[in-house]
Image (spheres, helix red, strand yellow):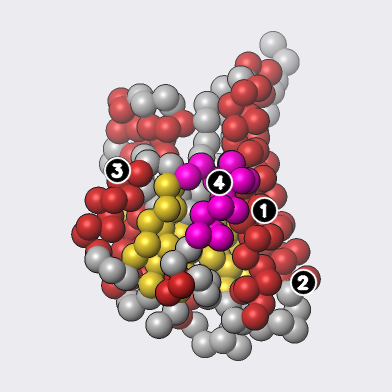
Amino acid sequence: MKTALVTGATSGIGEATVRALAGAGWRVVATGRRAERLEALAASIGAQIHVAAFDVRDADATAATLDALPEDFRGIDLLVNNAGLALGTAPAQQADLGQWQTMIETNVSALVAITHRLLSGLIERKGAIVNIASVAATYPYTGGNVYGGTKAFVQQFSLGLRSDLHGTGVRVCSIEPGMVETEFTLVRTGGNAAASDKLYAGADPMTADDIAATVLWVASLPPHLNINRLELMPVSQSFAGFQVARAD
């Protein structure tokens, strides 16, 4: 039985990925900040899952948790770097610097730290890394500023890992979703349910289960096959035109 570690497993894509992997017979280490949600997830799945509540931005807590994994969950074959967030929708000149720093610490620094910590074991086991990026890595939009920048880092870091891990057998994939209906917009807007509902209304967006099924598919491919980047959007979403500022 193979073992996966999924960050940000308390909701949305992370939780759905844990369920998809466990349903396919994987052992799963599910991590996140909200212990009560992790405990409920474990209760619904059973002994196949081990939960660990900590903030991925805390390097010491991350290291301590990984060092304390039960024997059956120590050999990580798949790392799913899902933990991440967007905060704020303001243009750069009006943005909150603290929100920018939180996004960088979560989406970049924490992802790098846990990846670095697990790399030797992933190489030993010829495992796989799936990083959850975003279409915001490729297509800028007003208010996307630092969030888009962090996801561009994830995209490029994934390609860099592929290059560095050449010959080791480790697979690396950057999955880059567009609109997915989760708690993402609630978090981004500080709990504004009306803004979240308005964004997804009538759009038939992708679901967390859609992305989880994609992660499982990538993880289940033959070991000689690597998906470098995978961009997904709902049919209702496509590319916007360029902005043009005109003189009065």
Crowd tier of the residue under label 4, counting other residues whose Cα lies within 10 Å: few below 14, some 14–19, many 20 or above: some
Q: Amino acid at mark 3?
A: Glu
> What whole-number distance in Å separates the C-alpha atoms at marks 3 and 1?
26 Å
Please say if 100 is above or below 46.
above
Residue at image x 38%, y 75%?
A: 26
> What whole-number distance in Å separates the C-alpha atoms at marks 4 and 2?
29 Å
Residue corresponding to mark 1: 112
Membership of 37 in magenta stretch: no
Q: Position of residue 221 (x, y in %)?
A: 49, 82
Q: Secondary structure at mark 1?
A: helix
Please identify the quarter of the rendering in which residue 235 is found: bottom left
* Pick the front one: 56 or 89: 56
Residue corresponding to mark 4: 61
Left or right: residue 27 versus residue 169 is left
Residue corresponding to mark 2: 163
The N terminus - image quarter:
bottom left
Q: Position of residue 245 (x, y in %)?
A: 69, 23
* Pick the front one: 44 or 199: 44
Q: Magenta span covers which residues? A: 54-68
Q: Position of residue 95 (x, y in %)?
A: 62, 20
Q: Amino acid at mark 1?
A: Val
Disc nearest the viewer among 2 and 3: 3
Q: Which disc number belongs to residue 241?
A: none
* Pick the front one: 189 or 44: 44
The C terminus - image quarter:
top right
Residue at image x 38%, y 32%?
A: 186
Residue corresponding to mark 3: 36
Mark 2 and mark 4 in contact (Cβ < 8 Å)? no
Q: Secondary structure at mark 2?
A: helix
> What whole-number distance in Å separates the C-alpha atoms at marks 2 and 3?
39 Å
Between disc 2 and disc 1, whose residue precedes? 1
Q: Secondary structure at mark 4?
A: helix
